[in-house]
Amino acid sequence: MGKPRGRLQVVATPIGNMGDVSARARQALESAAAIAAEDTRRTGALLQALGIARPLLSLHAHNETRRVPEILARLAAGETIALVSDAGTPLLSDPGYELVRAASDAGIDVESIPGPCAITAALAVAGLPVSRFCFEGFLPTRERERRAHLSQLADEPRTLVFFEAPHRIAATLADLAGELGGDRRAVVARELTKAHETLYRGTLAELAQRAAGEENFRRGEITVVVAGVAREAAGVDTGLLRRAVDLLSKEMSPSRAAAIAAQLTGATRSEAYALAVRHSEKR
């Protein structure tokens, strides 16, 4: 009789509402030989609420590399290990990538137990295009690096999704407005699925102003969804438009630079003007 094969089960857990635990996730947690958890205290509280008692293994950003060989050995011995993060779907801005990659490379079965995810939950209610989107996770914490990263996303046509800490949300929204344009539509989803779930809708400029003035805005778990850049004119070469605006803005006002750049590239004047204003603000 052959040696039993171990399995690594990647299990999604609630992002707030305990009612979102699926029957399949519960069964996976109950039957696992051990559960690899980002924070054993938070996962322990989850298991207690579910009436489940299983051994916990700590697996987080600072110890994952050291933990992988130990967990691989247990999987190779035939054990089933469940992988969870603090909330939602593991690996999405959470630890677990090294373990999943190592297990798959070793020929161990890796199974997804899907469920709650803040990314898809926010997209579902944002009222913005979702046929294509780009998940950017957490932005850099320092303003200079954050703005530099956002400037690279200014011409991204896909809807953008970010996670952000509550103490940085006001600064991040101000930087988003500055780099992407204050008139860009966006939604800030706070405390999704929890008792105080709140959706703030508006332009980036409006949301930045609210975040600066409303204390509750700066509390809880936050997901930001931002509309991609509008493509009102078909076939616009965004690289050419950006270069034209950069060159023209050195010699004339933003409005004049935008008018000429729009004629040269076929872009809308409003799109060219937004770039020209951002260029003048950086000078």
Image: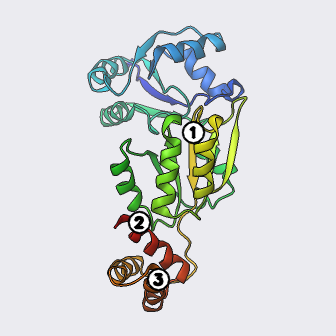
Q: Amino acid at mark 3?
A: Ala
Q: Is residue 33 left or right of residue 70?
A: right
Q: Is residue 107 left or right of residue 213?
A: left
Residue 210 percent location from the top left of the image: 63, 47
Residue at the image position 43 percent from the left and 68 percent from the top: 278
Residue 79 percent location from the top left of the image: 42, 17
The C terminus lies in quadrant:
bottom left
The one nearer the camera, 210 or 115, is 210
Instruction: Tell me the mark number nearer the camera, choosing from 3 and 1.
Output: 3
Residue 138, can we see it? Answer: yes
Which residue is the site of mark 3?
258
Residue at disc 1, secondary structure: strand
Which residue is the site of mark 2?
281
Around disc 2, counting alpha carbons within 10 Å, would you say few (fewer than 14), some (14 to 19), or many (20 or more)? few
Instruction: Tell me the mark number nearer the camera, choosing from 1 and 2.
Output: 2
Q: CA distance from mark 3 to mark 2?
A: 15 Å
Residue 112 percent location from the top left of the image: 52, 35
